[in-house]
Amino acid sequence: MVIVFDLDDTLYDEVDFVRSGFSEISQFLKDKKYFDFMWNEFCQNGSGKVFDKLINKFNLSISLQKLIEIYRFHRPDIRLPKESVELLKFSKKYQTALISDGHYIMQQNKFYALKLEKFIKFALFTDYYHTQKPELKPFKIVMQKYSDEKDFIYISDNPKKDFIAPNKLGWKSIRYKNSNGIYKDCKNSANFEVKNRSKIIDILKELDG
């Protein structure tokens, strides 16, 4: 059995990365007021135009591209929740992998900040392979990597696109309905759905039975 994880809002809450990125920017600009503005704007209106509004609000001379680079490529201050650590420890007895969208360097920085290399044997960042979910390619790469295995399971949070490919390929899929995530109100499209990461272990035991 191969257990394959998504990253953002699955193994940790992506809002923690957002907070870390805003903190990095405010440190670069040398004033906490910039963090307060970005965080309030994010909480009220989402992440779409936070940096544009920051520049306009404070008449900053820094470019939008520079803010994006600081945010995207900083070394994030993020931690795995206890339930994720327990899940990953349980999964170590199986083959493990990760499939994650997003800029390759940014996702890799998250991976190592969370120390996921201790638990996950094969990390696939789709950007590196010039693909993304819901394309079949990243899932097929994992199947080729573990060609001796028959059963594959994908654990993720986004029912809009994350389960399309694994469902087509005959994988089992588990949705973690993250109450802090942006997809919390979307209808489930996975075989299973849980609201607590610790419940995933029960499903994995059942699937292995």
Image (cartoon, helix red, strand yellow):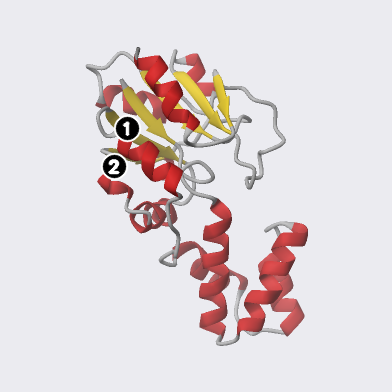
Spatial CA span between label 2 and label 1: 8 Å
Q: Quadrant of the C terminus?
A: top left
Res. 128 visible in picture:
no
Furthest residue toward bottom: 30
Task: Indicate left or right for 201 with 183 as reference.
Answer: left
Q: Which residue is rendered at x = 39% and y = 56% of the image?
A: 105
* Vertical position of residue 149 compared to residue 185: above or below: above
Furthest residue toward left: 148
Rendering coords of residue 128 (x, y %): 38, 45
The tag earlier along the polypeptide, 2 or 1, is 1
* Vertical position of residue 74 compared to residue 33: above or below: above
Judging depth in this view, the residue of 10 and 71 nearest the camera is 10
Q: Which of the 4 image quarters holds residue 75?
A: bottom left
Q: Which residue is rendered at x = 58% and y = 56% of the image?
A: 15
Mark 2 surroundings: few (<14), some (14-19) or many (≥20) residues within 10 A: some
Residue hosting label 2? 119
Q: CB under 8 Å between callouts 2 and 1?
A: yes
Q: How many marks?
A: 2
Res. 115 visible in picture:
yes
Q: Which residue is rendered at x = 33% and y = 28% of the image?
A: 142
Element marked by disc 1: helix
Judging depth in this view, the residue of 161 and 204 nearest the camera is 204
Q: Which of the 4 image quarters holds residue 3?
A: top left
Rendering coords of residue 118 (x, y %): 26, 47
What type is the residue that disc 1 sits on?
A: Ser
Residue 91, numbered label: 1
Q: Quadrant of the N terminus?
A: top left
